[in-house]
Image (cartoon, helix red, strand yellow):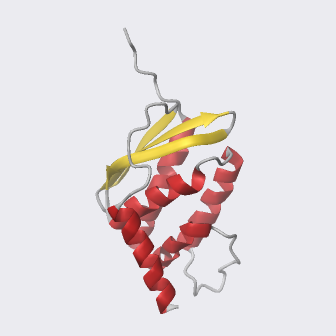
Amino acid sequence: MSDLRELYQDVIFDHYKKPRNCHVLDCANHQAEGYNPLCGDQLTVYLKVDNGVITDLSFNGSGCAISTASASLMTEALKGKTLKEVEHLFDDFHQMVTTPESAPEGAPRRDLGKLEVLSGVSEFPARVKCATLAWHTLQSALRKQTNPVSTE
Ligand code: ZN
């Protein structure tokens, strides 16, 4: 288990140092900003949604290793997913980071793939908000359209 932990930390560190899809998405038709005052994390999530499918997404901003790695992993995990699939992934991810592995009620989880590297966050309640910031920001982006820039 400790080897696995180490591997997880390596992946998180890698995504923190070299975040994937970390840029403004010019073709985005949804976007939202998220802020976690407890830690000082802030980021913007950009989405391109076509016919109920996230065809492209990205984020940018600044935050701690957990929030940055989580946003980076999320953009990789959600590209090409339908909004229904995204909803399920959000539920599963949220459950994973809020339910310590040792908890008796810890239900068997769906396969979250690479997102599982963040499962250790469940042991640190103060970091749960860092890990879920990108996801909550994504939800808020899905609820509103971005205003197209006026060309006058
Ligand atoms: Zn943070």
Q: Position of residue 77 (x, y in %)?
A: 57, 57
| Residue depicted at x 42% and y 70% | 12
From the viewer's side, name the closer residue of 62 and 15. Answer: 15
From the viewer's side, name the closer residue of 133 and 2. Answer: 2
7 w.r.t. 113: above or below: below
Q: Position of residue 120 (x, y in %)?
A: 48, 78
149 w.r.t. 2: above or below: above
| Residue depicted at x 71% and y 78% | 108
| Residue depicted at x 42% and y 47% | 59
| Residue 66 can be seen in this image | no
Q: In this view, does 37 lie to the left or right of 59?
A: left
| Residue depicted at x 38% and y 59% | 68
Position of the C terminus, as image quadrant, is top left
Q: Position of residue 25 (x, y in %)?
A: 44, 37
From the viewer's side, name the closer residue of 113 and 133. Answer: 113
User: How many marks do you count on the picture?
Assistant: 0
Q: Where is residue 58 in the image (x, y as percent from the top left)?
A: 46, 45
Q: In this view, does 83 lie to the left or right of 48?
A: right
Q: Which residue lies furthest to the bottom in this view?
A: 2
| Residue 78 can be seen in this image | yes
Q: Which residue lies furthest to the top in this view?
A: 152
